[in-house]
Image (tube, grey):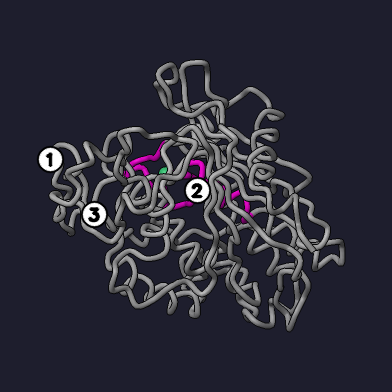
Amino acid sequence: MSNLKVDNVDEFGRCCSSLFEKLPKTGKPTETEWTVLSCVLQYDSISNDIEVVSLGTGSKCIGASKMSPTGDLLNDSHAEVIARRAFLLYLYDNIEKSIDNVDSIFAKECSRFKLKDNIKFAFYSSQLPCGDASIFPKNADENYGDILEKNKRKAEDNICQTDSKRSRFLDIHRTGAKCLPQNDQDCRKSGVEYHLIGQVRTKPGRGDRTLSVSCSDKIAKWIHLGIQGRLLDMLLVEPIFMSKFIFGSGVPYSEESLIRALLKRDPDQIIMPKFLPDFFQTSVVFPHVKSETKVRPAAGSIIWTKANNGLSEVAIQGRKQGVTKKKVKSSSSSLCISKYNLYKKFQSILHKDEGMQQIFGSNILDVQYNTMKAKATTYEENWQYLKNNFFKSWTVKPNIWNFKVNVT
Ligand SMILES: [Zn+2]
């Protein structure tokens, strides 16, 4: 049976734009500002229903020196990262519903939770992710609505080494994300020789260097290991993958750079993701993309999740907007998607579910965040393999998150 609605990627784009329009003005870009919009959409392979289940906007990142050991601060406020973290709240919410025997996307299987077969997810973003996927040749007669001709680009070629082949291109699209300090650096020569390709990069931030890798790197990790991350991995029967990645129009687009950055970084790569997503560009243009009139990035980030019947917050510099100086260190200033609050959700599920307590043992009440994350051994094994064979390099973050949460 054909699935017209679900097969029409514009339908996905329209759902995201229309939810964004319905949200309050707070946190949205002004006339002269631009932002990125990312969403996770759920669709049902039986009923054809499509709905947005999480949304994020923003393009800011906070430097490494601001990282908070209590997990109350969100360092990376890029739209893609916010949409993912808000999606995790939606997953936790559905796990709770499953425990309570309320209608849920999960079914219980051997003490863990399994996504129902008809439930699929798509990831939408108004532009290509920062980092490697954003690096590709500019076409002289570039039409942002079209996918560039395939034979004009060779993703496997290293731009810096193949300048002669690429001389017909005047320039490439660039990313602000930087190569890791321990690796080779961009040539930064004019035109096509500016960037290296296939590199793990870190996001630019205000002040000191960030330890947050680019969205291309993060999304590649989600595609290979699942989007659920370490903690949820322990609660689920299997990882959660996005079936489709859908990008907006009116911005540069290259399917080939997406394939390189997210699926196959180098021609000799021996691993491919088990679950291959499809890439699409919708014809829907998000009205707040960067342009001649929209020159500054919006300061705030909008967070929205379908969890708890729809919950939205606005983030400024990694905390809730409008927090007074006095309250800045209190947990009430912490966003619903901070490490602290996501761990609190995880812990509240362990407390609620006896099956989980049997798996995790009785001392779960007193486990620190980083100790708990280290218990995800299957995820860790897969991550080590991916790091060595796909990324070949990664940022090293200090192990400072030894906080505990209070679930009562
Ligand atoms: Zn990004």
Seen from the viewer's position, the closer of residues 183 and 245 is 245
- Residue at left offset 85%, top offset 61%: 103
Task: Tell me where residue 36 appears, x and y as whole percent.
Answer: 50, 35
Task: Give the residue drawn at x 39%, y 54%.
Answer: 256
Beta carbon of the mark 1 residue lies under 8 A of ligand 1: no
Mark 2 CB near ligand 1 (8 Å cut): yes
In the drawing, what numbered circle is on residue 180?
A: 3
Crowd class of label 3 (few under 14; some 14 to 19; many from 20; radius 10 Å): some
What's the mark number on residue 189? 1
Q: Is residue 397 left or right of residue 192?
A: right
Tell me the kind of residue under disc 2. Answer: Val
Mark number for residue 234?
none
Residue beneath disc 2: 81
Magenta part of the protein: which range? 60-88
**Do the numbered discs 2 and 3 sit on residues whose CB atoms are within 8 Å?**
no
Q: Of 248 and 405, which appears nearest the observer? A: 248
Residue density around tag 1, few if under 14, some if 14–19, many if 20 or more, within 10 Å:
few
- Residue 83 within the segment the image draws in magenta: yes
Identify which amino acid the numbered label 1 is placed on.
Lys
Element carrying mark 3 = loop
Q: Is residue 277 left or right of residue 182?
A: right
Q: Residue at x 58, y 57 (%)?
A: 244
Report if residue 354 is visible in the image.
yes
Q: Position of residue 9 (x, y in %)?
A: 64, 47
Looking at the image, tell me whether mark 2 or mark 3 is earlier in sequence order: 2
| Camera-side residue of 127 and 65 | 127
